[in-house]
Image (cartoon, helix red, strand yellow):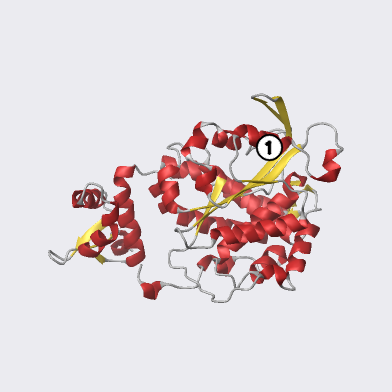
Amino acid sequence: MELDKLSENDHLEEILPIEGWLGEYIQFAKDLEACPRFKFFTACCCLGAAVNNKVWIQRGDAGLLPKLFPNIWVILLAPPGRGHKTSTINMGINCLIEACPEVRILADKLTPEALVQALSEPVGPRERIRIGPRDATGLIKAPELSVFFGRQQYNTGLVALITDLYDYREEWSVETIGRGKNVLKRNCISILGGSTPTWLQKMLPDDAFTGGFMRRFLLVEMPPNYFKRRAYPKNLKESTGWSDIVQGLRTLSIIQGEIGWTPTCAEYYKEYYENLKPTGDEQKDAYLEGEAEQVLRISMLLALSKGELFISLEDFKLAKQIAEVLMEETDPRIERLSTHPRMSVAQDVLSLLRQLGPTPESILLKRVYRTLSLGDSQFYEAVRVLLKTRDIEIIGKPPNTTYRLRKETEK
C-alpha cells in the first residue's frame, strides 16, 4: 500500500448515527485509534446482548417465522497487529459487564458440552434461587476467533451447535456426555469476535458459507487505507463520561416488549424484501441470504438506542445503508474466502490492483512472492486466469508490462 494513501477516514463514519446511546458511544471513543465502524458494531453487539430476548420483532403471523432479536453476530477483521480489535472488544465488554452484570459472558475455549452447560447455569443471586431451565442468553467474546473456531473445533461440533442456536426456539434440548439431557429455553446468543483475513482464508471450513455459518455474521473489515496514531491514549474508564455511557446501557437494558414499526416503514420493508434478488454466485448468495435479517437487527438497535420500541422509516433506511456498505465491501472478501488455496494468488493480485491502481508487473511480483510455494510460475498462472476471465488487462509492453483492473476502463 502506498503510504500517501493512508488516512484516518473511515467512509462508513459519515452515515453512522450521531444520536442515541450508539451515537454517544462512538463520540465518547472518538480519540481511540480503532476505526469508527469497529466501535459502532462493538456497541451494537453489547446493546443486543444487554436486551437479549426481552425485545423482539415478529415478521408475519406468529409461528411462521421465529422471533427475531437484536442479537447480532460480528467479526471485526483487520491485518495482524493493526485495527485494535482486541482493545475495542474489551472496552465494549467492560461496559456491558458494568452495566449488566447478569449477562453471561462466554469466552476462551469452549467445547459443545461446556457451551450448553454454561448457557443452562444460573447467573447472579436471583437466578440461583430459580427452579427449572434458564433462558439460554449470553455473549460469546472471541477476540481471537482462530482460537475459538478452528477446524478442530468445527469437526467436534462447536460451529454446528452455535449455528443451530442462531434461530430462536422456546425450548431446545441436547444430550451431553456424563450430564444427560440439558434443556435450554428461549435461546438468544450474541457473538463479538476478531480475526485476520489470513486466518479466515486458511482456517474456515469449506462449507462455512453454503453451510450457513458465515451467513449469520456481519463481516466488519477495517478499510485498507485506514491509519490512525495517538501517542498518548487516555484510559476512558477513568474519564467522567464513562459512567454516563455505562448508565445509558443499563437504562436501555430494562426495555422489553415487541418492537413494531410505522406503517410507512412496514411498506418500505415489504418492497425491499420482496425485491432482493440472487446474484447467481452460490457463495455470495449464501451470505446475502441473511441481509434482510441483518438490516432488521441493526434497525432494532438504532431504535432501542433512542429508547424506542418502534422502527421508523429513517431507522430502517439508515440500517439498510450501513448494511449495504458492508455487503459491498464484503464481496471481494467472500471471493477470497471461497477461493481454492491454489488460486489465492489471483485474489492477492486483484486486491493489490484495487488498492494501488495500475501496477507494473515487477511490483506485483515483489508484493506476492512470499506466498509463491511453486515459484513465479504460480504468479503467471494466476495472471493468465485473470486475463481470461477479463478481470484484468495489460497496458504497456515488456519490459514495462503493467496490469490494471478491467472494470476501470469500462466505467
Foreground of the two, 135 or 324 = 135
In the picture, the quarter occupied by the C terminus is bottom left
Give me the residue at 56% from left, 52% from top. 143
From the top left corner, tell me how far across and down residue 291 is, in percent: 55, 48
Name the side, left or right, on which 370 lies relative to 88: left
Residue 365 seen in the figure: yes
Q: Secondary structure at mark 1?
A: loop
Residue 241 picture quarter: bottom right
From the top left corner, tell me how far across and down residue 307 is, in percent: 77, 59
Foreground of the two, 332 or 3 = 3
Query: Taking 148 as reference, is 21 above or below it?
Result: below
Mark 1 closeness class: few <14, some 14–19, many ≥20 residues within 10 Å: some
Give me the residue at 54% from left, 62% from top. 84
Name the side, left or right, on which 282 lies relative to 377: right
Query: Taking 410 as reference, is 372 above or below it?
Result: above
From the top left corner, tell me how far across and down residue 237 is, in percent: 70, 67
Foreground of the two, 368 or 178 = 178
Foreground of the two, 197 or 278 = 197
Task: Look at label 1 and name its amino acid.
Answer: Tyr
**Residue at mark 1:** 168
Query: Taking 84 as reference, is 208 above or below it?
Result: above
Give me the residue at 66% from left, 59% from top. 92
Query: Taking 67 as reference, is 22 above or below it?
Result: below
In the picture, the quarter occupied by the N terminus is bottom left
